[in-house]
Image (spheres, helix red, strand yellow):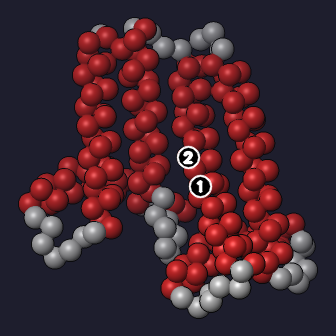
Amino acid sequence: MQIAMRVVSAVITVYMIGIFLRVLLTWFQGPSMGQPFYLLAAVTDPYLSLFRRIRFLRTDRIDFSPLVALIVLVVLLNITNTLASYGTITVGIVLALVLQAAWSALAFVIVFVLVIDVIRLLGEVFNVNSVSAFWHTLDVILQPFLGWVARVVFRSRPLTYLTALVAGGVLLLILVVAGRFLAHGLINLVQELPF
């Protein structure tokens, strides 16, 4: 069984690389991408389509469905690697792997929004011309989060964009630090389950 799990792990790893290449190539898609691109799309698109159907994973500008698709494969890879190494696995370890993957994905999104928030904050502080497409894209990405901050934290009181950016950045930083401690504590607790 351990040899079979090593083979499955290798297949999952190659498939993950294929998905990663597929996502990267969509950024540079042109009229003549060639046969290898279409072959890669034929192999990876059926799996990716399962996640593209989930609406909340997609916004107007960002599609998080490939990230979630890769996270699912990471969990499967970790399970097969554990089985290949030890020949057995517990429900607690599987739950710990799922929680770890979920926290990694959530932490990635939080840090991504935090970086965008800091870039936008620096643009505001240094009074950079904010009418370009770059700044507009950052604003579109930040708008749902900053709107939530204004509604929930400030109870819909009027506030400046600079204040919203600072409050949002502080909140995101707190979420990353507190979430990390909470996630690691929960993962360690679940991992020790005896069954």
Viewer-side residue, 173 vs 89: 173
Drawn side of residue 188 relative to residue 170, left or right: left
Drawn side of residue 107 relative to residue 157, left or right: left
The reply to whether callout 1 and callout 2 are in contact (CB within 8 Å) is: yes
Drawn side of residue 18 relative to residue 85, left or right: left
Q: Residues within 10 Å of mark 1 (few under 14, many from 20)?
A: some
Q: Is residue 103 above or below residue 79?
A: below
Q: Amino acid at mark 2?
A: Ala
Q: Amino acid at mark 1?
A: Val
Viewer-side residue, 189 vs 20: 20
Q: Is residue 113 above or below residue 146?
A: above
Q: Residues within 10 Å of mark 2 (few under 14, many from 20)?
A: some
Distance CA(mark 1)–CA(mark 2): 6 Å
Q: Secondary structure at mark 2?
A: helix
Residue 85: where, in percent of width, then height? Answer: 40, 11
Q: Which mark is residue 58?
A: none
**Residue at position x 51%, y 85% from top?**
133
Q: Which mark is residue 109?
A: 1
Residue placed farthest to the front in the image? 126
Q: Is residue 157 above or below residue 2?
A: below
Say if residue 140 shows up in the picture.
Answer: no
**Residue at position x 83%, y 82% from top?**
160
Residue position for label 2:
105
Residue 90: where, in percent of width, then height? Answer: 53, 14
Say if residue 6 shows up in the picture.
Answer: yes
- The answer to which quarter of the image holds residue 150 is bottom right
- The answer to which quarter of the image holds residue 159 is bottom right
Instruction: Quadrant for the C terminus, please.
Output: top right
**Residue at position x 46%, y 33% from top?**
75
Drawn side of residue 86 relative to residue 169, left or right: left
Residue 178: where, in percent of width, then height? Answer: 78, 42
Q: Is residue 118 above or below residue 72?
A: below
